[in-house]
Amino acid sequence: MLNTQPLRENLTEAGYTDAVPLGDGEYLLTSTCGAQEVWFASPHHAGYGVVLDDGTELEFVRSR
């Protein structure tokens, strides 16, 4: 049977070193190579996502 669940990874699996809350559900994620991206808390979204230790699901918004 085909797996239809969207892919979710934790920060380490996704290649990020930390996530800093910016407010209003936005987070600044920093990759292992120093790139910064803005992600938004979006539970149960359909695409790829990063899950924080507290269970917050993040969806990519934009590079910074």
Image (tube, rainbow, N blue to C red):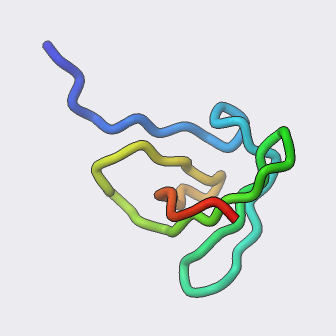
Q: Which residue is most to the top?
A: 1
Quadrant location of the N terminus? top left
Q: Is residue 24 above or below residue 43?
A: below
Where is residue 48 shown, x and y percent of the image?
Answer: 42, 43
Quadrant location of the C terminus? bottom right
Q: Residue at x 51, y 68 (%)?
A: 40
Q: Residue at x 21, y 30 (%)?
A: 4
Q: Is residue 18 visible?
A: yes
Nearer the observer, 58 or 36 = 36
Q: Residue at x 86, y 48 (%)?
A: 34
Q: Answer with left or right where residue 40 lies relative to residue 1.
A: right
Q: Quadrant of residue 29?
A: bottom right
Where is residue 45 shown, x and y percent of the image?
Answer: 32, 56
Where is residue 55 shown, x and y percent of the image?
Answer: 54, 56
Where is residue 24 shown, x and y percent of the image?
Answer: 56, 86
Q: Quadrant of residue 62?
A: bottom right
